[in-house]
Amino acid sequence: MATDGHKRSQVSSAPPRKLSVQKFAEARATELETLHTIVTDRLKNDFRSQRSKRRRTTAYDNQAAKKRSRKKQKHGVVDQSNAFLSEKDDKNVPRRIRRRAELKMNLEKGFCTSGDGTKRLRTHVWHAKRFTMTKLWGYYLPLGLQGSGRGSRAVLKWFKAGVLAHDASYHVAMQLEGKEESLLSVLRMVLVPSPSARSEEITRSIISGAIYDTAMLHQFGAPCSTPIAPVTYMWRPTCQQDKDNDASAVYNCVISNGLEVTERSSTFRHLWVWIHASAFPAGYDALKLACQKEMEESGSVIKCLSLEGKLAKLEIMGSKAFQLLQRTLCPVTRSKDHTWALNRHSVAEASDDSHSKYVLENEEDIPSHAVMSLRVKDPRVFIDKRKTANAAESGSASILADVQGTEDKEHFVYENISEKKEVILSLMGSEAEGTSMLAEKNLWDVNRGISPPVEETVICKERYDQNKNLFCLDESSSRVLNTSTNLQCSRSCPILLLKNNDRRGMHNGWSVILPLSWVRAFWIPLISKGANVIGLREKHWISCDVGLPYFPSDFPDCHAYLCLKETESAASNVKDELRPPTQRPLRVPILPPWNSIQVSLREGPTKMQNAETFRLEDAVRNNSSSNSECENYDVTYFVARTSFSLKNFLNEFQGCKLRLRPHVTDKSTSFTAFMRDESNLGHGQNGITKFSYNHKLCFVRVFLHAYKEGFFEEGAVVCAPQLTDISLWTRSENIDGGLQVPQSAVRSYFKEQSSGKWELQLPGDTISRESHRWPIGFVTTGFVRGSKKTVAQAFCEAVLLAHIRGEQWDMMPIKRRRKEIYVLVRNLRSSAYRLALATIVLEDQEEDVEFL
C-alpha cells in the first residue's frame, strides 16, 4: 500500500497546458458515433430545419451587410486600417452609428450633446432602450418606464421590500473656496434657514464635514427674497484638506478610537452646493453675486466654480439599499475598530475638528445626513465570495470583511504612536495597484483631474485570460495590457456616500457622488445585483408616498415650477390639437391660477351674496386700481417652509388670533392644550378678511386625506366648505351624490383670458351660487395609484385655513376638536366635491425644506 501511494504521488493530476482537439475527438470517436446514431433515429435521418421554425433573413443579400461593415470600418467601429472611403461617404454614415460610437466614448469630463446642445447622461443608451425619454432642463432624461404611466404599485413594492436606483447626474455642484468665516457669511445671505439657525452641536458637525444640510436658496439682493430652489450643501472635511495642503499633516492625523483628529492649521475651506438643473443658472448667479458682495466688504478672496460635467450623482433608495451598497462597494482601506459609531439620533459626537472614516457595517450606527468619504475598488471586478451560510450566521456583520482574494491595506489602532508612524511611513513607500495609497487624489480634487476607469475591453480580455488559465489552455497576456493601461487608468475610485434619511427617519436612501467618467462602471453592477431603475415619474411617486416635496412640482413659489408647467401646458395643447374636436377633453388650467386665492380673501369664504351684487362689485373691480394688484400677484405671495417664517407672518396680525400653531421645540405647550384654550374662542374671526384684503399671501404645504372616498388629481382645487357641507359626510346615513356643481359651472369655474391666463369666474345663476365654494389652494401632487396611504400634497392660504379651523372649532365642543381641518376638493374635470382632512406640515415638523 505504501508503494502504491508513493507511485500515485509521482503522477501529476493537473491537466496539460494545451489540449489537442483532434486527439480528444479521436479518443471518443465511438461515443460520438453512438450519439449521432441516436439523434438520427429521432429525426428519421432528416436534418433539415422545420418550416414552422424558419425565419426571414437577409443572408442571401450580402450587399447590405457589406455596406454596413464598410461604414463601421470607416467610422472606426470595426477596423480603422480599412477606412479608405471618400469624404462624401463619411457624411452618409447613419446617425445611429455615429451617435452610438460617440456615446460609447468614456470622456473624462463633460456630457455628450446633440445638435441643439441637449446633453445626454452617461447612462443614456441604457435608458433609451427601456424608458420613455423626454427633453427637460437641457438634458435627455428618462421620464418613466414604457407604458401609459401606470405601474406605481410595483414601484412602491420595490421601494418597501427592495431597492431602487436613479441616475441623478442632472444635479449640478457649485464649489466655493475661501475662508471659513467668509463662506459662512455668503451662506447667510442666500440660504433659509441659514447655518447659524441650527443648534450649536449640529452646526459644528456640518462645518466639520461629518454631515450635510439642506436649505432654500434665495436670490441675492431681491426685495422680497425670491426663492430659487432647495439645495444641499456640504463642507470638505478639515483633515482631508490639511492632508492635501501639506504632506506633513499625515503625522498630525492620529487615528484614535476610529476617529481622525487633526489640529486645524488653516481656515481656508472648500464647500459644495448641489442644485437641480432647472435652477442652476439662477442659483449660480445668486452665489456669484453673494461672493462678490462678501469680497467687497471683507476683502477676502472667494472663488465660485461650477462643477458641471465633472461629478455625477446616483441615488439608491429602498429598504435594502444599504445591503446593495455592501455587495457593490469594496473600500481599499478599512478600519477594524468599531468604537467610532455615532448615535443615530445625535450627531453632536462628531467634533468640529474630526471626521470619521465610516465603514459599511451597521446602518443604525450611521447618523442621518452623514457624509462618508471612501475610495473603493472598481465594482466591475469586485466579486462577493461570501457563502450564504456565513451570511446567516454573521447577522449584521460587514460583507466587505469576508471578501477573499483581495490585497487591501488595512489600518489598525495602535497603542504606540511611534509604531503607527512607522506603519504610515511604510504605507507612503508601498505601492498599491501601481499607485501610492496616500498619493491618490480625493474626490474634492476633481478640478485637477481624476483617473478614469479601465476600459471594458481590457477587463473582458483579462477575464478571458483568467478563464484560459483556469482551464490551462494557454498563457495569459493580461500582464502586457496592465502595463499599458495602469499609467492612464485606475482600478479604484474616490466616492462620497450620503445618507439621505431625513431627521425623522421616514425613508431609506443613499446618494453616491462619484466622477462622471465612473458612472458606467458603477451603473451595471448596481443593476445586476438587484437594483430596479426608475425615472422622473416614479421618483415623484415615491416622494409623495413618503411625504416629501418634489422639486419643482411642489415648489410653486420658484421660477422652475412656472417653466415646468408652461412646458406641460404647451405639450398638452399640441396633443389636444391632434384629436378631433368632438374627442378633445375639457380644457383646464395646467398652471393653477394662484391669483384666484386673492379673490377668496376679498369676497369669502363667507355666505354667498346675490348675483346682482356680484356683478356690480365685479364691474367696480375692473375699473379700479385693484386690477393692478392682481397683475402683480406673482410677487405678492410666499410659501412658509419654516416655523420661524410662519411665526413672523402670524405676528403681523395684531388683534387677530389665528388658529395656527407652528411646530415648536418646547414640548411643554402641546397642540392639544392649544386646541382646548378657551381664550381663543371668537377673537378676530370677522376681521380677518378685511385685514388681509391687501396683505401679502402666505401659503403652507398640507397633506390631504380623503374622508370616505375620492381620488385627488394633480391640479385639483381645494375649497372652503360651509358648515352644512361637513354634515353631508359625517352623519351616519349615506347621501347619494353628495355636493355637486352643474356641468356648466365646471366649464366656467376658471375661464381662460385672451392673454392665456386663467381667472376665477363668479357665478351668475342661482343654482351655481348655491354650489359655489371659494378656492383656498391647489393640489400639486395627487394620489399615487396603488399606495395604501392615499395622501395628496397641496398648498393652501394660511389665513383662510385659520378662518376655516376657527369656524369648525366654534361649532363643536372643546373635547371633540381635532387637529385636521375639513376642506373640499374637486378635480377640475369633475363636478363632485369630496370631503378631505388637511394636515399642516409645519405643525408637525419645524422645517419643510428637505426634498427627495
Image: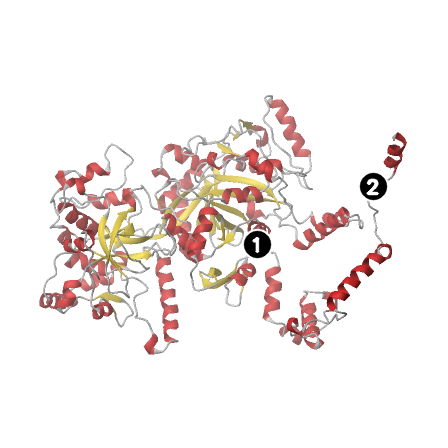
- Sequence order check: which comes first, mark 1 or mark 2? 2
* Quarter assignment of residue 602: bottom left
Determine the residue located farthest toward the top in the rendered image. Answer: 416
Residue 703 percent location from the top left of the image: 30, 50
> Which amino acid type corresponds to the residue marked 1 in the rendered image?
Lys
> Which amino acid type corresponds to the residue marked 2 in the rendered image?
Ser
Q: Is residue 419 above or below residue 563?
A: above
Q: Nearer the viewer, residue 374 or 228?
A: 374
The secondary element bearing badge 2 is classed as loop
What's the colour scheme?
Answer: secondary structure
**Side of 164 where 815 appears, left or right:** left
**Side of 311 where 547 appears, left or right:** left
**Which of the labelled discs sits on residue 13, or is there none?**
2
The secondary element bearing badge 1 is classed as loop
**Which of the labelled discs sits on residue 447, or is there none?**
none
Residue in the image at 51% along x and 64% along y: 117
Q: Nearer the viewer, residue 386 or 45?
A: 45
Q: Is residue 353 above or below residue 850?
A: above
The quarter of the picture where the N terminus appears is top right
Residue at the disc numbered 1? 109
* Quarter assignment of residue 181: top left
